[in-house]
Amino acid sequence: MNKVVDFLKYLIPFSFILFVTQYFVMQSLSSEFDFFYSVYSIYIFNVAATFFIYLLLIFVNKNFDGYTGFAFLGTSFVRMMAAVVFFIPLIKSNVENPIIAITTFFVPYFMFLIFEVYFAIRLINKL
């Protein structure tokens, strides 16, 4: 349980800072661009995926110590497939500039992925 609390100590402020930054950037650009996804839906997806993946990594690390890295690779693949499913409404719609919607999703996606990699490495190295 201590690892989860330690992870949440960093995940909550990290998510909040990214959320506020992206929210204000998107608000300032809303007159120029029409955003397909709201900031809330993007961050609900990313925070939930990051948290559940880390919980699974803790479980695998505790029970199958040598397979934590493989579990991280597998969950990263599943997360990418979930991102594709998240984009199905965008793909089916006739949005003028889909690059804006893709960028507003994948910038925080990769920031959360970097955050997740850092904590996965700490978990594997038992720091």
Image: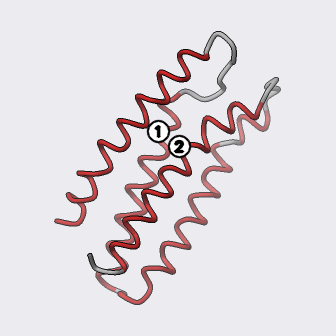
For this orientation, the residue located farthest to the top is 31
Q: Residue furthest left?
A: 2
Q: Residue at x 82, y 26 (%)?
A: 94
Vertical comparison of 94 with 85: above or below: above
Q: Amino acid at mark 1?
A: Tyr
Q: Position of residue 17 (x, y in %)?
A: 37, 36
**Which percent across, then down, holds residue 58?**
32, 72
Please tell me which of labels 1 and 2 falls first in the chain: 1
Where's residue 66, x and y in %?
Answer: 41, 90
Would residue 101 be found to the left or right of residue 14 on screen? right
SS label for mark 1: helix
Report the disc number at residue 108: 2
Where is the N terminus found, in terms of image quarters?
A: bottom left
Please report contact status of discs 1 and 2: CB closer than 8 Å, yes or no.
yes
6 vs 26: above or below: below
At horizontal 62% and vertical 57% (from top left) the residue drawn is 80
Q: Is residue 3 above or below residue 83?
A: below
Q: CA distance from mark 1 to mark 2?
A: 8 Å
Residue matched to label 1: 43
The residue that appears at 53% across and 43% down in the rendered structure is 108
Query: Pointer 2: residues within 10 angstroms few (<14), some, or many (20+)?
Result: some
What kind of element bears circle 2? helix
User: What residue is shown at x 64% (from left), y 58% (from top)?
Assistant: 81
Dot 2 amino acid type: Pro
The label on residue 58 is none
Quadrant of residue 32 within the rendered picture: top right
Q: Compared to 12, does 70 lie above or below?
A: below
Label 1: how many Cα within 10 Å (few below 14, some 14–19, many 20+): many
Q: Which quadrant: the C terminus?
A: bottom left
Q: Viewed as shown, does residue 13 lie left or right of 40? A: left
Q: Position of residue 21 (x, y in %)?
A: 45, 29
